[in-house]
Amino acid sequence: MRLKWVEVPTRRGGPALSTLRPVGQAEAESNSLSARYGKDAQPLHTDGAHLPHPPDIVVLACETTSTTPTRLWSRNRNGLFAERLPDFVQHGVFLIASGKDSFFTTATKGGHLRYDPGCMIPCDARARQSVRFFEERESAVTEHQWSEPAQVLLIDNRRVLHARASAAHEPEREIQRLNFYLNREA
Ligand SMILES: [Fe+2]
């Protein structure tokens, strides 16, 4: 069966396939996580949170190896029971500031997560509680180690948050990224 996966560029008009390298704050693109965190550890986030429709799948691949793990957090961490998301996560309102394309949103809708503290500005007390909630999840991550060459990691971007651990010690790290929508016609 043909998979109806459609590639999603993370920046309008940009390429779908990107090579991710640790960049310092000064060289980073504005509004990117690197602009705020540089080569240090990133906060947990979903990709494309600034898009009206964030991508469903994030594919990360590393041709060689990397000593910087990718951290993952899922509600379904133990396989059986999904951690219930508190009401404030469902109702807190965030602003995605992106010029004339700005819009308000919540961090979860219909069981799907959208969260990126780099581009989502909390607008009420519940949204600020949500920021703390996701910060606390940093202590409950699973780390994917890029210890073998040619590994590919598929992330369910609507249910799992991810983050790069600190890459300050590994400026030469290179990860290829491709994001997809599922079940859509090109
Ligand atoms: Fe990301």
Image: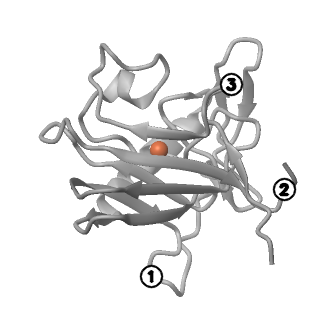
Asked if one can make out residue 44 in the rendered structure from this viewpoint, the answer is no
Looking at numbered disc 3 in the image, what kind of residue is underneath it?
Answer: Gly
Residue topped by disc 2: 184
Image quadrant in which you'd find residue 53: top right
Residue at disc 2, secondary structure: loop
Badge 3 crowding class, 10 Å Cα cut-off, few under 14, some 14 to 19, many 20 or more, is few
Residue at x-position 26% and y-position 23%? 24
Q: Position of residue 96 (x, y in %)?
A: 65, 26
Badge 1 crowding class, 10 Å Cα cut-off, few under 14, some 14 to 19, many 20 or more, is few
Which badge, 1 or 3, is on the more N-terminal residue? 3
**Is residue 22 shown above or below 148?**
above
Disc 1/disc 3 C-alpha distance (Å):
39 Å
Task: Tell me: 88 left or right of 72.
Answer: right
Which badge, 1 or 2, is on the more N-terminal residue? 1
Q: Residue furthest bottom?
A: 80
Q: Tell us which disc is closer to us: 1 or 3.
A: 3
Q: Position of residue 33 (x, y in %)?
A: 41, 30
Any mark on residue 78, and which?
A: 1
Asked whether the residues under the numbered discs 1 and 3 touch, taking CB atoms below 8 Å apart as contact, a structural biologist would say no
**Is residue 122 shown above or below 135?**
above
**Is residue 137 shown above or below 151?**
above
Residue topped by disc 3: 13
Residue at x-position 76% and y-position 68%? 3
Q: Residue furthest right?
A: 185
Task: Tell me: 143 left or right of 33.
Answer: left
Disc 2/disc 3 C-alpha distance (Å):
19 Å
Residue at x-position 64% and y-position 57%? 158
Residue at x-position 30% and y-position 19%? 25
Depth order, front residue of 153/97? 153
